[in-house]
Amino acid sequence: MHDEIIEQIDSWLARGEKVAVATVVRTMGSSPRQVGAKMLVSSGGAIFGSVSGGCIEGAVFDVCQEAIVDGQARLLHFGVADETAWEVGLACGGTIDVIVEPLA
């Protein structure tokens, strides 16, 4: 997977696009993806990879686009209580922390 990530970044950069990388840095409770999972986002709106299996990708995508524009990294915290987890597509509650970093 590491080689695929590098190839995708190189491809987007070769086309003149900017890139942000979102990485899961901490999980507690239920989490569809483990620490180290990555999602790449290009300035053209393309996505590669996943940080949650779909339940927070939309929000992470938006923050990646912001980071591409302003060049600032961000730490995101997502938490879902057991009672509401099914509403967002999770089997049970948990928290996921994701760092979003624009590539220089």
Image: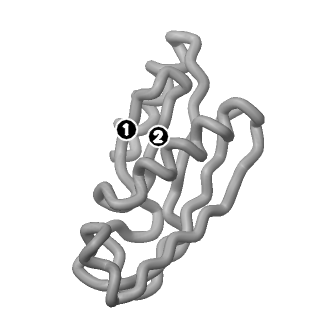
Q: Amino acid at mark 2?
A: Leu
Circle 2 packing at 10 Å, graded few (<14), some (14-19), many (20+), is many
Asked if residue 101 lies left or right of residue 93, the reply is: right
- Residue at 44%, 19% in the rendered image: 11
**Foreground pick, 3 / 69:** 69
Relative to 60, residue 55 above or below: below
- Of the residues under marks 2 and 1, which one precedes in the sequence? 2
Depicted 96 relative to depicted 24: above or below: below
Q: Position of residue 7 (x, y in %)?
A: 41, 28
Residue 33 horizontal side relative to residue 72, left or right: left
Percent across and percent down for residue 90 are 27, 73
> Could you say which disc has been placed on residue 75 in the image?
none
Residue at numbered disc 1: 48
Circles 2 and 1: CB atoms closer than 8 Å = yes
> What element does badge 2 sit on?
strand
Label 1: few (<14), some or many (≥20) within 10 Å?
some
Pinpoint residue 67: horizontal percent, then vertical percent.
Answer: 68, 40
Residue 40 shows which numbered tag?
Answer: 2
Marks 2 and 1 sit apart, C-alpha to C-alpha, by: 5 Å
What residue lies at 55% left-to-right and 62% top-to-bottom?
Answer: 98
**Image-quadrant location for residue 75:** bottom right
Residue drawn at point x = 49 percent, y = 36 percent: 41
Q: Residue drawn 53% across and 75% down?
A: 26
Across and down, in percent, residue 84 comes to: 34, 81
Element marked by disc 1: strand
The disc labelled 1 sits on which kind of residue?
Answer: Phe
